[in-house]
Amino acid sequence: MNLLKNILLLCFLVLSQISFSQVSDDAMLYRKDFKSISGKNTVSVTSYEKDGSHYVFAGGVGNIDVYSLDKEGILTPISNHELHMKKGPARGMVADRINGTDFLFVANKHGNVIETFKILTNGSLERVALVEDTDKTYLGTAITLQVVHMKKASYLFIGGLEETPGLSSFKIHNDGKLTHVQSMKDDQTIHTDGIIGMFVHNIKGKTYLYTGGFQDNGVSSFRVYDDGTFKNINNISDNNTDRYLTGAYPVTGVTLGENKYVIVGHRHHKYYERNGFIKKTDFEYHGDGVSVFKVNKKGALVPHFVLKDDESTKLQGQTRIEIVSVDSNEAVLAVGTRDDASIQLLKLNENGILSPINYLETGYSIYYGLRSHKIGEDNFLIAGSFRFDLGKIATYKIAPKINREGKVLRHIVNLKYKDNATEDQVNEAVKTFVNLKNEIPEITNIEWGENDSTEGASKGFTHTFTITFKDEHAREIYLFHKAHLDLVKKVGPIIGDVFVMDYWTTIN
């Protein structure tokens, strides 16, 4: 009997590995929902599970929006909360549990403060602490936070930018208040000028923190001690051949088998004015790529592999890298991009080699707002944009790619106008809708017509517009395109109701 059980278990494990491999090799993103935000934009996104419920926090300029997230990927607005001095944006956000209490820590970039919010039972927030910048703490223009749990206490590590570059450590107390432990000012050796990404690895009972330096073009590793102090271990700078660290941006990591890796992306300085924001202007653009570093036994970073951007990938202007899923042999990563306005899925194998899977063109640039979240066995991504004209947050489910070969996508919009809408207003609305074909090249075709049915089942809808797209990318670009958003804003006041359906059909 035991032999039979072992055989069945082995078969199950093998099938599980095969299933995961099949999904990861052909994984794709499918948008599940999008909701409006109350703030001006969505710069950063994080998520948290509390008592079996799942919450999303979207931080922008001036405030934070809170949503619940269900197992289908649907968002429901809960509350919104004003940031200190109505500043922001909430560039760095991290949620964690400290001795039984759930907190959201927020780096208020232009408020020059770190805010601590208690996460209440329904997911809404209550501010419980505030730490302002001083000459010794380097919290000005704070942009990234990382909670590090040690044996006897937990610490919040904070990275600054521009006038106050450096790395700081604060002890987190049970009530969410922060006490300063240590700060290390940036210099010409370490890469802590513009820490936009941090990650922690534990190696044989020792804790190491890894940072990227956006302004000083490199990555650094630090040993963290039980009392929250830290020291620099090693530093790796950009070069013009194989490093791809100019404007080092997102930093994450993963353990596969016996190997520990740190993955670093970059938003290359070529996207900025050389004589403006960027301090070191003697950089050379040698393309975009995602760098993989192997962590040695002493916690130091060792250059290992680079996946270079090409015509088949969307890696220009990387702003966020999220670990989607991990097993013992491979990890699936999601890369959000500002300049390609896409989410690229990648696979990292046990040997530390990255390979592209699929990507989705989101229709909006991702600045820092991308978060991976798992509910049950399903993997989701939550994304937002820094665009002030968008005002949306979206969710995506990661699932096996659906074969759309030989098919096109029809987007059917049925409209009912208000009784007080004038004929001129309706005609102008129709003209603007049809003109989308000239504004959005991804639209293959638009046709429209007025209702001519006499069956009495039209429910008052009078105008139908049918838009054709060749793929999912085109639909996403259309949905979040400025011309489409302008149309919705312009026509919205005279619309009585709208009914939308999409379907895939075989090309005749």
Image (cartoon, rainbow, N blue to C red):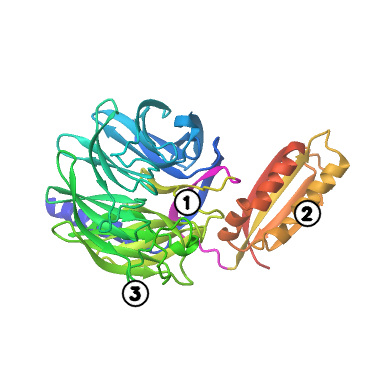
- CB atoms of marks 3 and 1 within 8 Å: no
Label 1 crowding class (10 Å Cα cut-off): few <14, some 14-19, many 20+? Answer: many
Q: Position of residue 142 (x, y in %)?
A: 37, 43
Residue 451 drawn in magenta: no
Q: Are marks 2 and 1 in contact (CB under 8 Å)?
A: no
* Tag 2 near tag 3, CB within 8 Å: no
Name the secondary structure under disc 2. strand
- Mark 1 — residue? 367
Q: Which residue is mark 2?
A: 448
Q: In the image, is 231 to the left or to the right of 159? A: left
Q: Which residues are magenta?
A: 389-405
Amino acid carrying mark 1 in the image: Tyr
Nearer the observer: mark 2 or 1; the answer is 1
Image coords of residue 340 (percent x, y): 51, 61
Q: Is residue 75 above or below residue 234?
A: above
Side of 98 where 357 appears, left or right:
right
Determine crowd level at label 2: few under 14, some 14-19, many 20+ residues with C-alpha closer than 10 A: some
Q: Is 177 drawn above or below residue 59 in the view shown?
A: above
Residue linked to disc 3: 241
Check the image and name the residue furthest to the bottom: 241
Q: Specify the quadrant that holds the C terminus.
A: bottom right
Asked if residue 80 shows in the view, the reply is yes
Name the residue at 40% across, 56% down: 334
Residue under the point 52% across and 58% down: 341
Q: Any magenta on residue 402?
A: yes
Tell which circle, 2 or 3, labels the residue nearer the N-terminal end: 3
Q: Residues within 10 Å of mark 3 (few under 14, many from 20)?
A: few
Determine the secondary structure under disc 3: loop
Front one among 43 and 65: 43
Q: CA distance from mark 3 to mark 1?
A: 26 Å
